[in-house]
Image: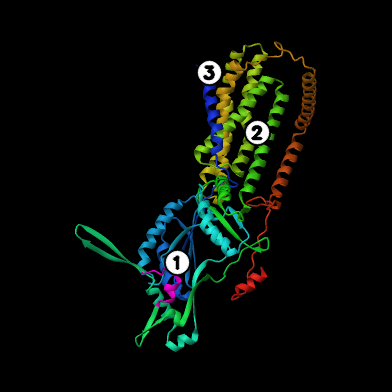
Amino acid sequence: MSLSRKTLEHPVLVLIVFALLGFVGIFTLRKVSVGLFPDIESPYVSVSTTYSKAGPESVEESVTKVLESSLVSVSGLKNLYSSSSEGSSSIQLEFDYGTDIDQAVTDIRDKLDRVTRSLPDDAGSPTIFRMNADSMPIMRIAVRGNRSVNDLKQIAEDNIADILEQASGVAEAAVYGGRTKIVRVELEQNRLAAYGFTVSQVSSALSKQNLELGGGKLNEGQKDYVIRTTGQFSSIDEINNTVISTINGYDVRLKDIGRAYMGFEDPSREVYIDGQNGVYVSITKQSGSNTVTVANEVYAKIAQLEETLPADISLEIIRDDTDSIRETIRTLVESAAEGLVLAVLILFIFLQNFKSTIIISISIPLSIVITLLSMSFAGITLNMMTLTGLILGVGMIVDASIVMIDNIYEYRSRGARARIAAVLGSQEMVMSVISGNLTTICVFVPFLLYIKELGMMGQMFKGIIFTIVIALLSSLLVAIFLVPVLAGVFLPLSNRTEKPVKNRILLFIYGNFEKAIAAITRAYRKLLKAALANRAVTIVVACCLLVIAIALIPTMQINMMPNGNDDSVTLNITMPIGTPFEKTSEVA
């Protein structure tokens, strides 16, 4: 028994299966992640180590070379770069695209654990940092109010940043601008000289008395008490009364040689918003989180904060990277929708049948919904690349259904009943549509085999290939199973003999269209006869066109990414080494 006949014996089952797929796909649309570009795992890992008060040469000999000798044997390593500067060492490790970076980081951590004891005592523990786009901020929120920038910074750190970090998908809410409150200690040089103290002595005395240490255990009866020494400073007065040293039985306190007071750290960074000193909160999303979804969660937290913050404090989004994402995705969706409508109109003119057009109109969105459902299950984001694949797929997914419906209509025109026409017309075309779609899918097989060798381009195009392949497979299923059921049972096709066209507008459209097709056919017939009559000339012209096309390839502009129009400009200023902060701020 043929597949088509078996399918038409259970039309309700087929309809229910596709209806369920469609409904599940529609409900899953809200869960499809949205982004501007595909998620690409960067193959770069950085290892940073501090070595305070050491020169570049010492850092290189004592830290960088020791770590390099261990990291050079990391599995899958492609290139290794290092730089040593005063007080710090940085090593960059590059892997091939497609490498399991999580496993690579684990391997790096194991290698570092083996050589950490060989580092100098003053060197810090090596820090591993994975390079990826998720580490870049996605949003900046200005904190405005009739207060000083230092007060705004305090409010942002105490009342705003913590709430924003509670939003789902937010990794960090960092506050920039203003200065942080610190305890400042000012010493008078003449008093230090009078007592014979140095700055390091004062610093050491303060550090030793600002400690909180464990004091062991105290046993009393059947209970053990854990003891700790509470030696940290709790007020400015305690700091001022700290004994620095005892001279001839006299306790020299900090207030005798200087004073401690609450102040602000020295300025090393200033933030200007619209020309005025300001404070903003930078939002960074968690790795793997969807940018648009995280932004929506942050919007909700901002609305929550505006109800609890003081009346004079307001929050303003001054930069939102999701705006460009939303605009791009909206434009692509509108283009896909317009293309879908245009395709249906053209199909109506060519098929000249309402029911045939309705069946094709059902198969197109259903194939797209099934594709989006598969993308959601596979964890592929809806981005510029995958949407482009969907737009390309709109034109290809109708091919199989058109072939099926056209052959079924041909049998109906001969007088066969709807169900019989659906069986005969579909079973004739099953192998044709399968071979046609599989031929298109096989084009992408070499790409998948060499995806690692293509580097970043392979990672970017992986999503678009998946989208096109799933769209073709879903359209193939729709054409083989759903189209015959609709055409033979639920929307039985009718021929012109049974139901002739009586509408004058449709008769006018169909008549002009058939005249145009007839004219094109006649022109094609004449051109084909001329080509067959002059075969040598035709071959020479075709070869010349091929040579010209190949010769023009070097003149093409080849870029990895298309040139886009950004709505922002970034300006970086490099000042001479040693330029004071105030001078840099003035220039900026």
Q: In this view, does 58 lie to the left or right of 341?
A: left
Q: Is mark 2 on a helix, strand or loop?
A: helix
The type of residue carrying mark 3 is Val
Q: Say if 281 sits above or below 475 in the image.
A: below
Q: Does the magenta portion include 293?
A: no
In the rendered view, tell whether residue 125 sits above or below residue 245.
above
Q: Which residue is drawn at 39% across and 79% down?
A: 243
- Mark 1 vs 3, N-terminal side: 3
Q: Is residue 428 visible?
A: no
Which numbered dot is residue 49?
Answer: 1
Q: Which region of the structure is painted magenta? A: 231-242
Kind of element beneath mark 1 = strand
Q: Which mark is residue 395?
A: 2
Return the mark for residue 12: 3
Report the amino acid beneath label 2: Gly
Q: Which of 85 and 406 is in front in this view?
A: 85
Numbered label attached to residue 515: none
Query: Residue 23: x, y in percent?
Result: 55, 28
